[in-house]
Amino acid sequence: MRSTVSALLAAVALLAIAVGPASAARPQAPDRELSVATYNIHHGEGVDDQLDLERIALEIERGGADVVGLQEVDRHWSSRSDFVDQAAWLAKRLGMHVAYAANLDLDPPAEGRPRRQYGTAVLSRFPIASERNTLLPRTGKNEQRGLLEVVINVRGVRVRFANTHLQHNSASERRAQAQRIAELLGDAKEPTVLVGDLNARPDAPDLAPLWPIFIDAWTRGGEGPGYTF
């Protein structure tokens, strides 16, 4: 698969960025342990070109994370994923709450069929109190990207969990998207976690708008370089 068990456990080790707001001005929340992960599921297809959502579910189960940000998630998209609502399928299989964000939203293949959607999702063992998806800047015909934010209730503490997938072939576009994310999350009232497939190393200049806001979790708790792809 695109992400191994070790990558899943690393949570923000890979192309994800950081955990927790860096600003001291935010109110201090009571200590709560929360494990998070980020996982680009490649619409359920592994490097063996086989579609297998059960295999994805097993990876998430083995990782044991409380909250998981998923990228490249199909929802009734096409035959490549058997037109399945993958986020709903995984949520039911794992017994987790789910929020889905469609960054691509196309007409159905036939009248009476669901809309074809592609985007990101969040799976959570804790209730999701609210959700919001914001489309991020793009240029020309590049793929539309977004930032999915959910607020979850972690045993009495509200936590904002944000999940994204930045442009893969344009550093300038990634920087614009990172800047927009910084604007959206910079004044969050809750403790905030940002994960995703950022398509860049943590020290890449295009991610600089995020540095003043977030602490890179891998530098605090990871071992080795932490890159998974």
Image: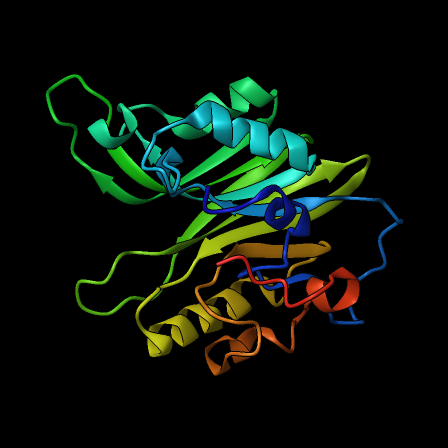
Q: Is residue 139 left or right of residue 100?
A: left
Q: Is residue 1 left or right of residue 11?
A: left
Q: Residue visible at 53% across and 41% down?
A: 131
Q: Is residue 4 left or right of residue 177?
A: right
Furthest-right residue in this view? 30
Q: Position of residue 45 (x, y in %)?
A: 36, 36
Q: Residue visible at 63% across and 57% down?
A: 12
Q: Along the line of sight, which residue is nearer the eye, 228 or 158?
A: 228
Furthest-left residue in this view? 110
The number of discs equals 0
Q: Position of residue 17 (x, y in %)?
A: 59, 64
Q: Residue visible at 70% across and 64% down?
A: 218
Q: Along the line of sight, which residue is nearer the eye, 37 or 23?
A: 37
Colouring scheme, one of rainbow, by chain, secondary structure, one colour: rainbow
Depicted 2 relative to depicted 191: above or below: above
Q: Position of residue 188 (x, y in %)?
A: 65, 59
Depicted 2 relative to depicted 97: above or below: below
Residue 223 position by quadrant: bottom right
Depicted 81 relative to depicted 148: above or below: above
Q: Along the line of sight, which residue is nearer the eye, 92 or 80?
A: 80
Q: Is residue 227 left or right of residue 104?
A: right
* Residue 39 in view, yes or no: yes
Furthest-bottom residue in this view? 205
Residue 44 position by quadrant: top left
Q: Position of residue 11 (x, y in %)?
A: 64, 51
Residue 189 position by quadrant: bottom right
* Residue 78 in view, yes or no: no
